[in-house]
Amino acid sequence: MSVQEYLDKHMLSRKIEDAVNAAVRAKTPDPILFISNHMKKAVPSVITKVKARQILDSRGIPTVEVDLFTNKGMFRASVPSGDSTGMYEAVELRDGDKGTYLGNAVTKAVKNINEKISEALVGMDPTIQLQIDHAMIDLDKTEKKNELGANAILAVSIAACKAGAAEKEVPLYKHIADLSGKTNSILPVPAFTVISGGKPSGNSLPIQDIIILPTGAGRFEEALQMGSETYHHLKAVITEKYGANECNVGEDGGFTPNISSVREGLDIVQEAIARTGYNGRIKIGIDVAATDFCIGTKYDLEFKSPNKSGQNFKSGKDMIQMYKELCIDYPIASIEDPFDKEDWEHSKHFCSLGLCQVVGDDLLMSNPKRIERAIHESACNSLLLKINQIGTVTEAVEVVKMAKEARWGVVVSHRCGETDDSFIADLAVALGAGQIKAGAPCRGERLAKYNQLLRIEEELGDQAVYAGEDWRPSC
């Protein structure tokens, strides 16, 4: 084949002429670079390769990382993991061989990506997220993604989403907003974990987290400053009251002083807030994680205490009274999982009181059927979205739409086993979630999310809107 025949076959002469004309019109100072980029844009992007590997998360436990390639570049994503998997959430595929990583290796999920998912997706347009996610769901053929693994599917879904944004030459949050049909981007209120307790921590505090929400900030940048300053003042308070040895932190960066009661924890957090001068501008939240200490129909608030009195078993009615008193005595604006995941009756009763935001985590598990039931029964008024519980970007967008249509709040959440992937920051902005729970203003994998929100706010400039006092819909 001659050079002229080759040019004619691929219509290169016309394409090169178009690129040169565009460079002339643009009066570009670097015509070679301009023409190169112009020619690249003329070629529709497709997925050319998907490569997965096993990496370690913030706890030193294996998770899945994916490199997805298009003719525009390589796009990387890694997935988080929780302490436990609920029966209503998508299945995280692990090897189960106790001789390797104590059974936590994910080489089966990695193999599924490299041998099955990759083959199914090569040639697909990365901008069509719905098509990509449905292709993987169809390939899996199970309701909870048991076959391929939700960790495998989600890693590819996120990587494809990043590739789609690059193909459209827009920021990731803008691409996700387009996918969801939203037009306005909102910077969320950060829900900082400042004290950790519950099942994962070695202290005697029964509830899982005490959280601060800087709703009184004017911008996200100010909210991050308020959270950081309060966190460091809290460290000083803990050191003064309990000694420097009590300033160890949990998996998500919250301090773990050896306190045994919720009130004791709330008191030292309030003291830290007072020292910052942010009284009235920072609200408090608690993540009770009550499923972890529910025994039958009773709640054992001494389940971690070495010297149980046996006097601290509470009924659902007792728990409601306790929450009422806490909401009176402290600026509590949010309570997550105040009851067991199957205690729908007390959840409904408490939510109906309208005392604060009632967040469903274990109650919902980001499961559309559970969310639908909770909306119908008014069992909570806010969704805690953990994307690994549902398994694809498309499905995450859909459950947030359900929550928003019900006028619920939405909290985009991290997991205890995190990576440095900051995807949930863009997701929270894109979906107008209003809240993001990504741990303490401490530890690199947590700050990766908060720092990305700083960048997004800077990029939006005068168009940036911080949720602030509008952090959740009025009920």
Image: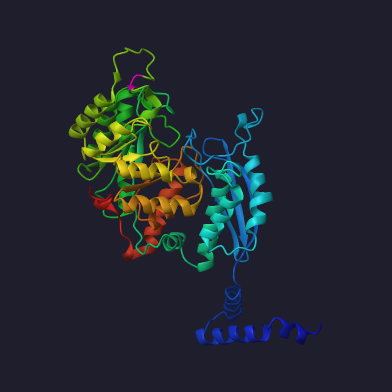
Q: Is residue 11 above or below residue 239?
A: below
Residue 332 appearing in the image:
no
User: Which span of residues is magenta-colored?
Assistant: 298-302
Q: Residue furthest left?
A: 328
Residue 299: in magenta span: yes
Which residue is nearer to you in this view: 269 or 292?
292
**Quarter-wise, where is residue 305 in the image?**
top left
Q: Is residue 299 above or below residue 181?
A: above
The percent coordinates of residue 86 (x first, y second) are: 47, 35
Residue drawn where x is 56% and y is 35% of the image? 60
Residue drawn where x is 31% and y is 65% of the image? 462
Q: How many marks?
A: 0
Q: Is residue 82 above or below residue 183?
A: above
The percent coordinates of residue 44 (x first, y second) are: 59, 71
Name the quadrant of the N terminus. Answer: bottom right
The percent coordinates of residue 43 (x first, y second) are: 61, 73
Principal secondary structure, stretch drawn in magenta: strand
Which residue is nearer to you in this view: 84 or 40?
84
Which residue is nearer to you in this view: 159 or 214?
159
The percent coordinates of residue 10 (x first, y second) are: 70, 81
**Quarter-wise, where is residue 255 in the image?**
top left
Residue 68 appearing in the image:
yes
Residue 137: in magenta span: no
Q: Would you say 185 lies left or right of 423 here?
A: left
Which residue is nearer to you in this view: 106 or 211?
106
**Quarter-wise, where is residue 442 in the image?**
top left
Residue drawn where x is 57% and y is 54% of the image? 76
